[in-house]
Amino acid sequence: MTTSAHPLAHFDVQEIRKDFPILNDGTRTRPLSYLDSAATSQKPAVVLNAMHDYYVHANANVHRGVHELGDAATSRFEHARHRVARFLNADPRGLIFVRNTTEALNLVATGIARQGGLMASDRVVLSVLEHHSNIVPWQLERSTHGFAIAAIPLHPDGTLDMDEARKLLAPPTKLLSITYQSNVLGTVTPLKELIAMAHEAGILVAVDGAQRVPHARVDMKDLNCDFFAMSGHKVYGPMGSGILWGKPELLSSMSPFLGGGSMIDTVTFERTTWAELPQKFEAGTPDVAAAVGLAAACDYIDSLTYEAIEAHEKDLMQHLLHMLDSLPYIDVYGPNDRERIVGAVSFNVRGVHAHDVGTICDRHGVAIRVGHHCCQPLMRHLGVPATARASVAAYVTHDDIDSLGEALADVASIFGQVITQHTSPASQMEHRHA
Amino acid sequence: MPEDDLYREIILEHASHPHHHGTVTSATHTTEGRNPVCGDEIALSWNEKDGKVSDIAFDGTGCSISQAAASILCDSVIGLPTSQALACARSFRAMLVEGTAPEDDMSDMAALQGVQAYPARVKCALLAWNLLAESLEAEEQSHD
Ligand SMILES: Cc1ncc(COP(=O)(O)O)c(C=O)c1O
């Protein structure tokens, strides 16, 4: 950590916006306030150029053939692996390129269960915060292997019930798979504490890091999780780029996920042996350009520095939460301590369905996400069918948030009558107790 | 101020005070559906008597468009011969999917024409209407 200058001293959001072609798209006829980076971030030109450069100068299939371009492609792909590994302070042998977080979590579930690591007498623990991509892969494996699944419950404000977590992190639990940061509430889970508790009981820990890496440095050695999944497209990288990182000794003992080319050592019709890590888990031709683009995204983040991104986003979140909290017809979900809401916030306009809010925001050129956010168990916990979610990134400005405020005022004027019904003192009481 | 192209008075009125909300007792037909993307849910129940939709109601939750469309549906088809109710559902669909101009007798249904300009919301408006059409089509086939 540098202690000299304030992290925001050299951070000029207007300069940063110039790095993102889509924010300067002259063909657009409407304004754009992009507050949906938690779904996918926009991509800086350096990422797009790195991918273009790969196709123009080095495209060939990797790990095959002996020609010059094949070597160039392999070299760029492996360079990307080392770059991303360095970004996460991770052992590169355990760094597997996948398409996204979803694929990474399916790889872990399948790889462990198939090799006999999850049996009928075992239990997998998740939490009520989880994205469907950290629920359904386990259910698919459960249907074959018959283990139990339990979920750590939440307090009413959406924070994890750590007493219940402690109870669940005991036999017969074999594995905890949990999010680092909620894509709905923006809250960060006490992961290090959970990992320590789990490891003490001999339980493996897989982390869904999809929403954490966009906002803060994640260090595999420091975190000491067993598996870590993330999506490149949420961290200024291209779609189709994702990572599963795993401790090499664990990955070595697991079953492969997909079978095919590149992942084998020798193949006979009787028996096939697997390639060394990480190729064992990279069947078929990989998306080299996506990997190269993700490496460029790591460079981009490091050039801005996480310190500056965090400071900028903290300032944005304060502005955003202050705006939402000042509107009497808005319900914000999550802890009352607003400092704990990071990167994204969910809310509803009282009495108005989130889809109507989303449509009216869109008419103001404000892009937010509305719906269940692939978190139906969490929606059930919150007692709502859907929420609206605004999320921030390095290129978001106060003006973007002010545009959201104007759009919400418009929602209030269109749905005024409905909102009045729902904000009567009696119904407010109901809300508090709900 | 020109009227909002999507959230017209009639639609907001139907959404906040829906007509025929609930379930028809001893319904001859019930059907339900949901829109997995939005979470809109609609259950339709109706009675067929002498070849007509003698009574109809809907229950469910969702955005103003899905709820208003269901309320308008009930108003529009109650009392109609089933063949006309189906024709009604088909013209509604045509209005939103193919952009056909609303017919003169469509009354409140025509108020939903503006949804056509919002592709992400078309399925909200169609949820109840598709349920009715499927149910009536199944009925028609069983009589063939
Ligand atoms: C917390 C979390 N987990 C997993 C995912 C799934 O990511 P992807 O769709 O890139 O596989 C997302 C993104 O939608 C997410 O926010």
Image (cartoon, helix red, strand yellow):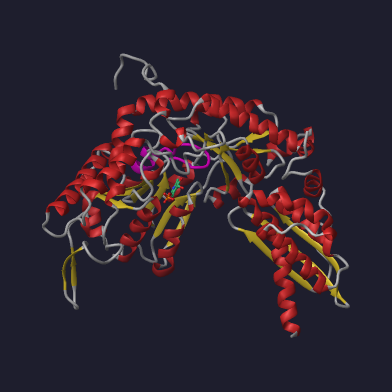
The residue drawn where x is 40% and y is 27% is A16
Q: Is residue A78 above or below residue B135?
A: above
Q: Assign the C terminus of chain B to one quadrant of the image.
A: bottom right
Look at the image and tell me in which quarter the N terminus of chain B lies.
top right
**In this rendering, position of residue B53 left or right of residue B131:** right
- Closer-to-camera residue (A158/B66): B66
- The residue at the point 36 percent across, 45 percent down is A238
Is residue B118 visible in the rendered image? The answer is yes
In the figure, is residue A186 to the left or right of A204? right
How far across and how far down the image is residue B91, in percent? 75, 64
For residue A223, say whether it is visible.
no
Which residue is found at the position 70% from the left and 42% from the top?
A: A352
**Viewer-proximal residue, A81 or A42?**
A42
Quadrant in the picture for residue A64: bottom left
Q: Residue A278 or A290: which is nearer the viewer?
A: A290
Q: Position of residue B117 (x, y in %)?
A: 66, 49
Magenta stretch: give its range. A181-197
Q: Is residue A123 magenta?
A: no
Query: Which image quarter: residue A147?
Result: bottom left
User: Percent from the top left, x then y, of residue A320?
Assistant: 56, 28
Q: Is residue A184 a member of the stretch shown in magenta?
A: yes
Q: Position of residue A137 (x, y in %)?
A: 42, 59
